[in-house]
Image (cartoon, rainbow, N blue to C red):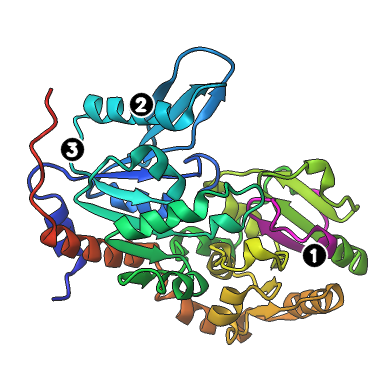
C-alpha cells in the first residue's frame, strides 16, 4: 500500500504522541544540515528528542541541559566532568531523561553508532540508522566504531543512506536499506536568484565572487584552493563556515581568499545571491569517499553554477547537469571556474530545476515516515507507560 503524507501524519499522531529519540554526533546549533532538515519535519508529527555529543567540563557531577529549539525539537546536551566514564555516565543520564520526560518505547534514530555504548539497553519500537557519513573514515575515528556500526546494523529495522556510495556499501550488510540522497529546501534558496541585499561583511569584496559554505575541516583541499586562488587572482573566493578538527591558521592565506566565518542557515541565501558561481573544493581522500554534499542542490537552487572536485556522488547524481562541472586538478578547476562565470542562467537552470523538483526535504521525510509507519505496524505493542 502506498501511504500519502496525510495518511502518515494521521497514523503517527494517533493516540499518545509517539517520541522519536535521536542520537547524534553533531550539535543541533552547529550547522543546519541533514539531521536538522529531517527532524524539524518529523517534529510536526512526532515528539522529537535530540541527544547531542557531550560537553566536557572541568569538574562537577554528570548532568544534562534540555532546551526546546525554535523548530520544536527537544535538545538534550550531556555535561560530563573530565575523568568520568562517558558511557556509564551517559547511560545514567539517558535513563534519568527518559524518566523525567516519561518516554517509553520511542522510535530510536541513530546518526552515530558510538551512541550504542550507552543506549544498547533501550528497545525502541522501531530502530532507524540514518547513515549520512562513513564516520570511521574521518581523522581520529575511534577504532571501535566499525564494530559498533556492525552491532547497530544488526539492531536496526531500517537503514537510510545519504548517498549512492553509502547505499552500495551498507546494503551488503543489511536487508532493508533505502537510498535518500541529500534534499533541498528550494523555497529557502530560490529568492537568491532575484537579488538580495549584500551582507555587511561581504559588501566590500570585489566581483566576480565564487563562494562556498560548509564546515571547513579535513575534507577541504587546502592545496587546491590555494593553487586556484593563485591561478585566478582576479576572482574573489569567499568561504563561509566554522572550522573543525583543523587549525584555522592552516587554511591558505591569499588576498583573494576571504573567510567570513560561520553564518546561520537563514543568512545563506543573502550571501549566495551576491556570488556569481559556487565551488566545492573537496579533497579526494578517504573521508570524502562516501559524501553526498547537501550544498550541491542548494547552490543550484540559489541560481549558482557549481564547480566541484570529482566526488563520486556528485558525478553520479549531477554529471549530466549543465550547471555542474567537475575538475580534479588546479588548472582544470580554474578553467571550469571561468566557464561557470560565463554561463547564462537559461543554458542550465531549466535542467537543474527539473532535477531539484524531485529532491525536496518534505518529500524525503514523507517517504521515510511511510517506511517507519509500516515498521511500527509490524512492531510489538508498546510497553506500559513510564511510571510517574
Q: Residue 260 occupies which quadrant of the picture?
A: top right
Please give the name of the residue rendered at 56% of the width and 44% of the height, measured from the top-left corner. Answer: 264
Q: Is residue 272 above or below residue 62?
A: below
- CA distance for labels 1 and 3: 55 Å
Q: Residue 208 got which mark?
A: 1
Please give the name of the residue rendered at 53% of the width and 84% of the height, measured from the top-left corner. Answer: 351
Q: Residue 104 got which mark?
A: 3
Quarter placement of the N terminus = bottom left
- Which residue is more in the foreground, 153 or 351? 153
Left or right: 225, with 367 as reference point? right
Q: Residue furthest top?
A: 60
Find out whether the residues at labels 1 and 2 contact each other: C-beta distance under 8 Å. no
Callout 3: 10 Å neighbours few (<14), some, many (20+)?
Answer: many
Q: What is the x, y in percent for residue 255?
A: 91, 52
Left or right: 167, with 301 as reference point? left
Callout 2: 10 Å neighbours few (<14), some, many (20+)?
Answer: some
Q: Residue 225 occupies which quadrant of the picture?
A: bottom right
- Which residue is more in the foreground, 52 or 225? 52
- CA distance for labels 1 and 2: 52 Å
Q: Which residues are magenta?
A: 204-225
Q: What is the x, y in percent for residue 308?
A: 69, 72
Q: Nearer the viewer, mark 1 or mark 3?
A: 3
Q: Residue 93 got which mark?
A: 2
Which structural element holds mark 2? helix
- Which residue is more in the foreground, 174 or 370? 174
Q: Residue 287 got which mark?
A: none
Is 142 magenta? The answer is no
- Which residue is more in the foreground, 173 or 219? 173
Amino acid at each position: 500500500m502506498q501511504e500519502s503524507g496525510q495518511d502518515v501524519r494521521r497514523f503517527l499522531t494517533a493516540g499518545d504522541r509517539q517520541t522519536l529519540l535521536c542520537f547524534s554526533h553533531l550539535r543541533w546549533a552547529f550547522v543546519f544540515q541533514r539531521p536538522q532538515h529531517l527532524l524539524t519535519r518529523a517534529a510536526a508529527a512526532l515528539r522529537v528528542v535530540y541527544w547531542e555529543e557531550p560537553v566536557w567540563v572541568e569538574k562537577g557531577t554528570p548532568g544534562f541541559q534540555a532546551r526546546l529549539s525554535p523548530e520544536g525539537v527537544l535538545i538534550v546536551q550531556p555535561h560530563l566532568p573530565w575523568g568520568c566514564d562517558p558511557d556509564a555516565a551517559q547511560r545514567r543520564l539517558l535513563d534519568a531523561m527518559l524518566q523525567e520526560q516519561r518516554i517509553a518505547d520511542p522510535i530510536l534514530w541513530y546518526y552515530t553508532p558510538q551512541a550504542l555504548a550507552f543506549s544498547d539497553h533501550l528497545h525502541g519500537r522501531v530502530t532507524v540508522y540514518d547513515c549520512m557519513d562513513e564516520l570511521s573514515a574521518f581523522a581520529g575515528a575511534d577504532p571501535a566504531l566499525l564494530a559498533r556500526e556492525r552491532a547497530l546494523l544488526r539492531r536496526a529495522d531500517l537503514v537510510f543512506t545519504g548517498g549512492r556510495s553509502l547505499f552500495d556499501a551498507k546494503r551488503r550488510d543489511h536487508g532493508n536499506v533505502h537510498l535518500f540522497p541529500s534534499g533541498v529546501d528550494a523555497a529557502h534558496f530560490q529568492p537568491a536568484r532575484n537579488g538580495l541585499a549584500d551582507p555587511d561583511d561581504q559588501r566590500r569584496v570585489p566581483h566576480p565572487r565564487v563562494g562556498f559554505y560548509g564546515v571547513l575541516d579535513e575534507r577541504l583541499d587546502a592545496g587546491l584552493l590555494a593553487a586556484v586562488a593563485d591561478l585566478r587572482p582576479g576572482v574573489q573566493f569567499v568561504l563561509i563556515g566554522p572550522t573543525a578538527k583543523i587549525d584555522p591558521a592552516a587554511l591558505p592565506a591569499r588576498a583573494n581568499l576571504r573567510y567570513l566565518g560561520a553564518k546561520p542557515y537563514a543568512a545563506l541565501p543573502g550571501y549566495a545571491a551576491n556570488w556569481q558561481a559556487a565551488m566545492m573544493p573537496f579533497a579526494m581522500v578517504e573521508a570524502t569517499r562516501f559524501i553526498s554534499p547537501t550544498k550541491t542542490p542548494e547552490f543550484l537552487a540559489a541560481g549558482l553554477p557549481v564547480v566541484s572536485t570529482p566526488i563520486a556522488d556528485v558525478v553520479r547524481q549531477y554529471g549530466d547537469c549543465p550547471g555542474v562541472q567537475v575538475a580534479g586538478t588546479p588548472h582544470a578547476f580554474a578553467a571550469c571556474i571561468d566557464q561557470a562565470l560565463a554561463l547564462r542562467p537559461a543554458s542550465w537552470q531549466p535542467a537543474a530545476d527539473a532535477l531539484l523538483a524531485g529532491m525536496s526535504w518534505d518529500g524525503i521525510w514523507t517517504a521515510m515516515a511511510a517506511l517507519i509507519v509500516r515498521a511500527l505496524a509490524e512492531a510489538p505493542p508498546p510497553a506500559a507507560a513510564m511510571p510517574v
